[in-house]
Each structure stands twice: as C-alpha cells, then as structure tokens.
Image (cartoon, grey):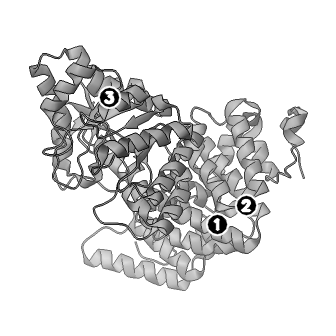
Amino acid sequence: MKLFDPHVHMTSRTTDDYAAMSAAGIAAVIEPAFWLGQPRTHAGSFEDYFLSLVGWERFRAKQFGIHHFCTLALNPKESNDPTLADEVIALLPRYLEKDGVVGVGEIGYDDVTPAEERAFERQLELAVRHDLPVLVHTPHRDKRRGTERSLDLVRASGVAVERVLIDHNNEETLPGVLDSGCWAGHSIYPNTKMDEQRMVALVKTFGVQRMIVNSAADWGVSDPLKVPKTAAAMRDAGISAADIETILWRNPIDFFSASGRIDRRALEGVAAIDQTELWQGNSVLRGQTPRVER
Amino acid sequence: MIHSAWLSRLPAPHYTSRVPVSVDPSLESLLGDLLLRRDPASWMREALASVAEETSFDRIVVPYAAAPRRLRGVQVKLEQAEALRAMGAEPLGARGIVALFRAALLLTLCRNAPAERRVELVDRLFRTGDNDERIDLLVALPFLPGPADFAPTAVEACRTNVLDVFTAIACENDFPSRWFSESAFNQMVMKALFSSIHLSRVRGLAARVNPELRRMAADYAAERRAANRSVPGDIATYLEGVKP
C-alpha cells in the first residue's frame, strides 16, 4: 500500500529521513511553506525559500522515489510583521503559478491577531484567483475558538468549503470541521497535537470521509514516519485495508487534485529513482554509488 | 510593419482590441496559428495585451511563471522550431513554445516601457527567476530593443554556478560578442573553457579574439600542462597562436 504524507517540512529533514520514508511506503509528500524557527526579516528570503520548494527540494525527494509537491503562503506567525506581510503576499501570485504548487498554505491563525486575520483573508482571495485549494493551520493556544473563527472566515471568503483543509485537529475541533464541509487534517506528533491511538479512535467514531493524516514533521522534535506508524496502528485495531488506503493515500490525492496539478497516473505508477541525475550540476550524493531503479 | 497571413485570418474582435498591442510582428507571426487555438491562444493573447497595457513587474511575472503549465502539450511548428534553434533555444519538447512565448512577453514589455524601466524590470525578472525562467530570458536578450543596456544582466548571468544558465548566454547566443566589454567577454570564454564547453559554441568569437584573451588562454594551457592535465584542443583552433 502506498502512503501519502500531505504535510511535512522536508527542507528541515535529512536524506536519512527520505530513505526511511521511502522504505516505509511513503510515495508522495506535500511540503507547506512554513516559518524557519526564527522570523525572516526580508521578503527576499521568501523568494529563495519558495524557489527551493519548487526546485531543489523536489529533486531531493525524487532521488528517493518520492513525489514532492508544495503549498505556498505567508505563514500565520510571520504575518505579524506588517511590512514583511505586504511584501510577501505581493510576491505570491508569481510562485502560485508554478508546477508542483498544489495549494495555498499554510495560512490561518497563530496568536489570532488582526494582522494574522488580514493575511489569512488576503491569501484566501489568492486561492480563489489562482484556483487552488487551501491548507489552514489551526492555533496551538485557544485552539477551539481559533478553529471556529477560521471556519467563519472561510465561509465568509467565498472559497468552496470542499477546497479547504483545516489542519491539526483534535477531539474537540473535529466535529465542527466535518460539519462545516471542510476536510480535516490530523498531525500525529510524538507528544502534542494527536497520537496514533487517538487517531484510531477518531476514525472509528467519524469514519474515513474527508479525513487526512500527516506527520507535520519539521525542524523540531517530530517524526516523519508518523503516517506509516498510524497505518500500523489502524491495522492492529482492525480497521480495513481499504479504509486505511482511503485516509492515508486516496484522500490527500482527491483533495489536492482540485489544483489540477497532480498527475494521478504518475502517482499510481512506480516512481523511477535515478541518483545519477544532477540538479543544476549538484547531487545529493557524497561519493556513494548512485541507486538506479526503474 | 509586416502582417503575415495568419493575422488576416483572425476573427475581427480579436485584433480590434482597445489595447494597443505592440508585439514584434516577426515574433507574433512565429506564434502563428497557435494564437488561433482556443485555450492557450486566448490566454497568450490576453497576457501579451495585459503587458502592453501596463508594463509593470506584476503584469509580466505571472504569465511568465505560468507559461510551462498553461502551454503544456503545445508543440511548435517547423518554422518556429527553426527560429528557436537560431535563437539558441531548445525547440523540441515542452520548452520550445515556452521560450517563444516568454520572448514575446519580454519584447512586448520592452517595446512599451521607457528605457530605464525596462532594464530594471528585465534585471529583476532575471535575478528572481527560476533556472528555466532565466534561460528563456537570456536567449531572448539579443532581440530586445537597446540590447546594450542589458549587458550588466547578461554579465551577471555568466557568474552563475548553473551550467544550463551559463550556456544559455555563452553558447549559441549573439549577445556577448556584440555587447560585452572585452574583459567580460574574455572571462566568459575562459569560463567556457573551464566548463569543458567547446568554443565552437561561442558565437562571434573570431571577431572578438584579442591579445589579452590569447594571453589568458595561453596561461591556462601552461597551467594544465604543468599539472599533467590535457589542454582542450579547441584552444588552438579558436584562439590562434595558443599552443594546444
């Protein structure tokens, strides 16, 4: 069974992670644009970051047989710098037109400030203009209210609810998100957010429709193998293989295919690995024998 | 202004646009009946008209970035392929039409913007572009009005570490031999030698060979020999007087 991790910040991960993810069955990932652990101070830093997400990082993933897509946006945290926010949002239309970009995200609330709300609204407008689905981050603090407020903003924005994925849900937020018609993401984390056993319980209660699971792994303590580990937990709990495949492979494809930029046939086929390839004359290898599998 | 046959075949509403479109007629005619096709055609036409109407960075950058996706599957025809080959662009596969359309966008921008603004816009487009966007821009440079003004951008392009970007300006491109200063041209030729690029690919080299370039190449050949390494054979062929 193929697995899809639709929220993982691979730029922060090593090639060992790519190799382990590939071995565990992950065949495709989506990397949402994010902050880097410390705030950027120039819009130009975002240009290079966006270019790396559609360029070098796609190549790196491909070297391990993994299809890499991304969603681009100004993240909620950095939306609080008003000059930076205006400049980065002005840059986005160009990058949103590029290959491999399958959504606007992650946008939403962090501190739930007026500046975050303004960036959130303006980027929902960009999603409409560029005909892309949306990935919405929900805050860690005051999560339930923040999620409800996100849903209100989505409804008011005119973006179709079935093109919106509300991420990082828990037992408290999930019912409201499913009722809204939006898709519901769950980030399986070592300690916070959600874990494998709680996820199993949610699937048993709420079923598989519009349910998405990801690792949200980044530069912090996190685990890029949480999607395969959740698959194992679901199997152990007696959830059918068909249901597991729906949640961990078909649902993210169905959701992000609204972008028109996902080739389903390529995803279903075997990804060719050719580590003899170079990106701009550069390789991920350091003297190893290149792996070639077709 | 030469209007080729395809223009007269266009239905009237398409070219009685209220926007005075100033696309170079030769490039427009190269796009030929691609402009008659429904989907990518109307998109290309609207993008060109939009850039002609307002020569801003925001107007050009979105269609410039979107071209590979919007024009997927559109193949160039024989005469277009020949023109692209003459421009040093790759005519086959998906990239041909993208290079041609991006050249048309750049030309439209430059014909409608004041000289000092067009240089700034083209330079910014180059600096912030991805590799393919940079390559298509470099290939189009010799065809833009006031080409000498773009020399700083083209010289900067030679400093890239990306081979395909370097060859887009250094190889099969008339720009360097016509508009580079002697020192910039010499540096480019030396970088081509270092990158194992055959000097036959540098257009206009014979007319630009100078004593300083001969000296640099001779020093390079001597350095290679001292290290027991081979000396590129084309040094002697193209830089007369330099021992291979």
Q: Position of residue B50 (x, y in %)?
A: 74, 50
Q: Where is residue B74 in the image (x, y as percent from the top left)?
A: 62, 33
Q: Is mark 1 on a helix, strand or loop?
A: helix
Q: Which amino acid does label 3 sit on?
A: Pro
Would residue B43 appear left or right of A47 to someone viewing this image? right
Name the subunit of mark 2.
B
| Viewer-nearest residue: B207 or A231 | A231
Which comes before the other along the chain, label 1 or label 2? Answer: 2
Q: What element carries label 2?
A: loop
Residue B121: numbered disc: 1
Q: Can residue A1 be seen in this view?
A: no
| Viewer-nearest residue: B10 or B6 | B10
From the image, state whether disc 3 or disc 1 is nearer to you.
3
State how far apart marks 3 and 1 are (Cα): 50 Å
State how far apart marks 3 and 2 are (Cα): 49 Å
Q: Do labels 1 and 2 share a chain?
A: yes
Mark 3 touches mark 2? (CB < 8 Å) = no
Q: Which residue is drawn at 41% across and 65% down?
A: A45
Would residue A230 appear left or right of A56 to someone viewing this image? left
Mark 1 touches mark 2? (CB < 8 Å) = yes
The residue to which callout 3 is attached is A175
Q: Are marks 3 and 1 on the same chain?
A: no
- Mark 1, other Cα within 10 Å: few <14 / some 14–19 / many ≥20: many
Q: Which residue is drawn at 28% across and 51% down?
A: A141
Q: Where is residue A110 in the image (x, y as percent from the top left)?
A: 35, 54
Residue B55: numbered disc: 2
Q: Which amino acid does label 2 sit on?
A: Thr
In this picture, is B11 found above or below A235? below
Q: Which amino acid does label 1 sit on?
A: Leu
Name the subunit of mark 3.
A
Q: Do labels 3 and 2 share a chain?
A: no
Q: Position of residue A55 (x, y in %)?
A: 40, 51
